[in-house]
């Protein structure tokens, strides 16, 4: 079986964008792929400096995977930090990665652009080496498990391409002794090249503070949905569904039939944004409620979560240790 692998960075509570872009599509691959899911806790350290929060978000991401349907018996769930081989391979791959490749990575370029816009003389202000090296560590996450496919949202595709480049560099240098699988990104078809918008219309992202967390209590979920901005088109006027963030989220969760019907009703006029928001809340609440219950049980301090992660750590190392043995031999260490 081919291997599918994906990860989530615990820098906040998992949100609808993570679910649509990565969690749901990744879990759909379980039947056809040997599937691996992990929590990229060391990646979070590039921005998160609060130990209690890092621990909380890490458990929260793990509980989210299981609540959303991950079966720890049939698939692999682990914490990145439990696999020390990843960090050893990170050094090896850093030495095989051109600095120029990292200069072109989106997250680093975005940080420089922000500094330029703010008129700062030092375009690297606030950039730590962890942020700069982020794509190498992500490549190693993927390569250490020799993943064939990486289900991710569109914003992570460049990172997977970088991982493929780095695999190529290793294979070019040492391919006669050991070859890494060259990975491919799998972007969900339903994404149609777009990322899920957040409560302000921009891409839903923890760094924009515009997320709808997956497992909010019903009342809070309703409040967040009701607070989403809409234009001032009067109730009776026709509305373009595709320009509405509320509709775009609805389309990812409602059935195709309901989506088509809602699009037509909006176009005909007579449906107000308030009504659309109520519909979105109902659809979300109905789908998320059963998962939320499992999540709440798993997030409790004495749940089975910790033993699931411990078992996952052992299985993940069983895969990574032999890879590192081969790599050391190949490079002459
Ligand atoms: P992260 O934690 O930012 O996001 C996790 C996954 O959710 C997707 N996603 C979205 N998809 C659609 N619409 C959105 N608004 C949206 N927001 C987030 C992301 O594309 C991602 O698939 N660097 C990664 C974590 C990582 C990783 C890896 C992933 C580390 N190592 C190895 C795959 C393989 C990240 O920060 O994702």
Image: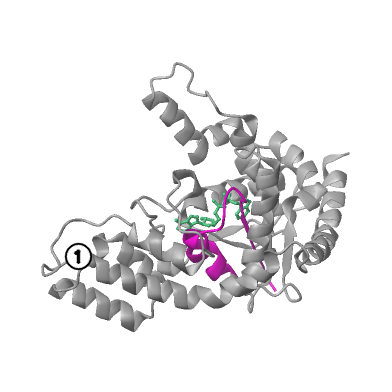
Figure quadrant of residue 321: bottom right
> Is 44 on the left or on the right of 228, as rendered?
right
> Is 66 on the left or on the right of 208, as rendered?
right
x and y percentages locating residue 228 in the rendered image: 33, 57
x and y percentages locating residue 143 in the rendered image: 70, 53
Q: For residue 187, say whether it is visible.
A: no
Q: Nearer the viewer, residue 136 or 114?
A: 114
* Residue 3 on the magenta span: yes
Structural crowding at the residue carrying mark 1, measured as other residues with C-alpha within 10 Å and reported as few (<14), some (14–19) or many (≥20): few
Q: Nearer the viewer, residue 45 or 193?
A: 45
**Residue 29 vertical position relative to residue 127 in the rendered view, above or below:** below
Q: Residue furthest left?
A: 237
Quadrant location, the N terminus:
bottom right
Q: Nearer the viewer, residue 201 or 281?
A: 281
Picture quarter with ligand 1: bottom right
Colouring of the image: one colour
Residue at left offset 64%, top offset 75%: 30
Extent of the magenta region: 1-26
Which residue is disc 1 drawn over?
240
Residue at left offset 83%, top offset 57%: 317
Q: Secondary structure at mark 1?
A: loop
Q: For residue 298, say whether it is visible.
A: yes
Residue at left offset 39%, top offset 24%: 118
> Is 323 on the left or on the right of 169, as rendered?
right
Q: Residue furthest top?
A: 121
Q: Nearer the viewer, residue 93 or 198?
A: 198
């Amino acid at each position: 079986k081919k291997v599918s692998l994906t990860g989530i960075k615990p820098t906040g509570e998992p949100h609808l964008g993570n679910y649509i872009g990565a969690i749901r599509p990744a879990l759909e691959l379980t039947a056809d792929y040997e599937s691996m899911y992990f929590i990229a806790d060391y990646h979070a350290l590039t921005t998160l400096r609060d130990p209690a929060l890092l621990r909380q978000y890490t458990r929260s991401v793990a509980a989210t995977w299981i609540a959303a349907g991950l079966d720890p018996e049939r698939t692999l769930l682990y914490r990145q930090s439990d696999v020390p081989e990843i960090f050893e391979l990170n050094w090896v791959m850093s030495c095989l990665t051109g600095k120029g490749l990292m200069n072109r990575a989106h997250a680093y370029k975005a940080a420089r652009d922000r500094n330029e816009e703010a008129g700062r003389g030092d375009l690297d202000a606030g950039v730590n080496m962890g942020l700069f090296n982020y794509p190498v560590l992500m490549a190693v996450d993927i390569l250490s498990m020799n993943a064939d496919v990486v289900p991710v949202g569109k914003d992570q595709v460049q990172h997977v391409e970088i991982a493929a480049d780095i695999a190529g560099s290793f294979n070019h240098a040492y391919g006669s002794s050991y070859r890494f699988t060259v990975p491919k990104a799998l972007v969900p078809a339903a994404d149609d090249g777009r990322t899920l918008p957040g409560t302000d219309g921009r891409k839903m992202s923890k760094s924009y503070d515009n997320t709808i967390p997956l497992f909010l209590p019903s009342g809070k979920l309703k409040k967040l949905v009701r607070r989403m901005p809409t234009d001032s088109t009067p109730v009776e006027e026709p509305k373009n569904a595709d320009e509405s963030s509320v509709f775009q989220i609805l389309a990812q969760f409602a059935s195709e039939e309901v989506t088509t019907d809602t699009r037509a009703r909006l176009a005909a006029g007579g449906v107000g944004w308030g009504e659309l928001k109520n519909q979105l809340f109902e659809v979300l609440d109905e789908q998320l409620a059963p998962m939320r219950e499992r999540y709440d049980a798993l997030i409790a301090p004495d749940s089975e979560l910790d033993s699931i992660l411990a078992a996952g750590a052992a299985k993940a190392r069983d895969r990574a240790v032999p890879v590192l043995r081969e790599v050391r031999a190949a490079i002459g260490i």
